[in-house]
Image (cartoon, rainbow, N blue to C red):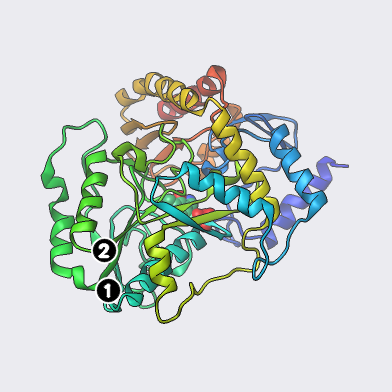
Amino acid sequence: MLTFQSIQSDLLFDAQHIWHPYTSLTTPLPTYPVVSAAGTKLKLACGTELVDGMASWWSAIHGYNHPRLNQALADQASQMSHVMFGGISHPPAVHLARKLLAMAPEPLETVFFADSGSIAVEVAIKMALQFQASRGLPAKSKLLTIRQGYHGDTFAAMAVCDPVNGMHGLFQGVLPQHLFAPAPELTPNDEWDNSELDAMQQLLEQHANSIAAIILEPMVQGAGGMRFYHKNYLAGVRRLADEYDVLLIADEIATGFGRTGELFACNHAGISPDIMCVGKALTGGYMTLAATLATRHVATTISNGEAGVLMHGPTFMANPLACAVAYESLSLIEEGSWRADVARIEQQLINELAPCRAYNSVADVRVFGAIGVIEMVASVDVAKAQAFFVAQGVWIRPFGKLIYIMPPYICNQDDIKQLTTAMQAYCLLE
Ligand code: PMP
């Protein structure tokens, strides 16, 4: 039984012993005890319900405690929770792979099931390096990416995160050195100008012989700055990758499964990458699972190379529980109204966040798909902002100068209104 004392004692233990994301153990930020979640709401131990603006970092697209996802998990648990994937296949993995490949851009034909987004990126990078070595071009071992990107917290992934916002300073000397083009400046609605691609082309012109792949987040640069860019940039990068004989890796971990208004952000530009990473919403936010998809050409080149195998195989690869929930989540997407929901949320965010532009505290307001961003002039005091938002009955966690939401697609008009009203109130306060 939860009592006031037991909750306080748990919070104290947590603060003294448990690391939270990007935080300190000596001066931790406050944490809020959540005891359950259903639909679009998180319930705090004190009984307060909060409309969730974060979808648990882009993942809980169908909302919480979904009866069909719960059932898929329970059914699979009664069959087999886990079994090693080395030398073994199982229906949840095969069924999920079939569905995922049917949804993904066409030439992607093979799947590697990874256990988190960062690992999916590690695998993608490893694929690109093995691909180049396998066709006798081992010197093509660098990555080319764009500034303001974010691809995860493991070492290979960190090395392609933005060199300023990312952790390059902290891990200087340890991270491999890659090539960075400037972040694209034109937003999705700007008039296109081909010179936007000049810097990327120049880097390819100078370094193509040492580049294995270009890696980027299509259309939306998420944790590196919540920036949206023009679809012609993405289409242009695809063209340049072919022209200069390098692979294109699309990190769709945040954007995949409808968030931007298309099933995958690559669809906005009508392009297909050679390698694509998905994660986050893959299981509807139920548990960790990610995947690295690749073309047949990439897969056969690696498999016919000197190593003859792709050198990766985590213990919990293709975990059956995660695969079963992911299959059901993709079924909900297939059957559901995600496209209409995302368009509806986008329109409401455009309308209701627009007034914030007029405030002195606000530098920019931008919306793309079911993603709403307010960039403040000054850095946000996270502890203060979070306390404010909780008092307003919403869950929003800012970072840097950004107050942003990417709520579950099932949020209704009232949920979104509550979120945007709280965001607006915070801007007025500052
Ligand atoms: N790539 C992108 C674009 C992401 O947004 C994230 C997570 N924020 C990752 C990779 C890493 O995923 P994970 O946190 O599951 O390791």
Give the mark nearer the N terminus: 1 vs 2.
1
Q: Position of residue 146 (x, y in %)?
A: 28, 55
Q: Are marks 1 and 2 in contact (CB under 8 Å)?
A: yes
What residue appears at the point 41 percent right and 34 percent down from the top-left corner?
Answer: 262
Res. 140 mark: 1
Q: Amino acid at mark 2?
A: Val
Pick whichever, 342 or 17, lies toward us.
342
Q: Is residue 212 above or below residue 407?
A: below
> Considering depth in this image, is 294 or 392 the residue closer to the camera?
294
Q: Which mark is residue 334?
A: none
Which residue has dot 2 on it? Answer: 246
Reply above or below: 76 against 354: below
Seen in the image, is 366 located left or right of residue 288? left
* Residue 338 coordinates in the image, percent (x, y): 51, 28
| Quadrant in which the C terminus is drawn | top left
Please name whichever residue, 26 or 293, is drawn nearer the observer in this view of the structure.
Answer: 293
Please, what secondary structure does the residue beneath circle 1 have? loop
Q: Is residue 106 visible?
A: yes
Asked where in the image residue 414 lies, by quadrant, the reply is top right
Relative image position of residue 214 (x, y in whole percent): 29, 60
Mark 1 vs mark 2, CA separation in Å: 8 Å
Q: Residue furthest bottom?
A: 306
Query: Mark 1, residues whose alpha carbon is within 10 Å: few (<14), some, or many (≥20)?
Result: many
> What residue is at 31 percent from the left and 44 percent from the top?
271
Q: Secondary structure at mark 2?
A: loop
Q: Inspect the image, locate mark 1, and give the three-letter code of the amino acid beneath it.
A: Lys
User: How busy is the neighbourhood of tag 2: few (under 14 within 10 Å), some, or many (20 plus)?
Assistant: many
Measured as percent of width and height from the top left, residue 40 is found at 62, 29
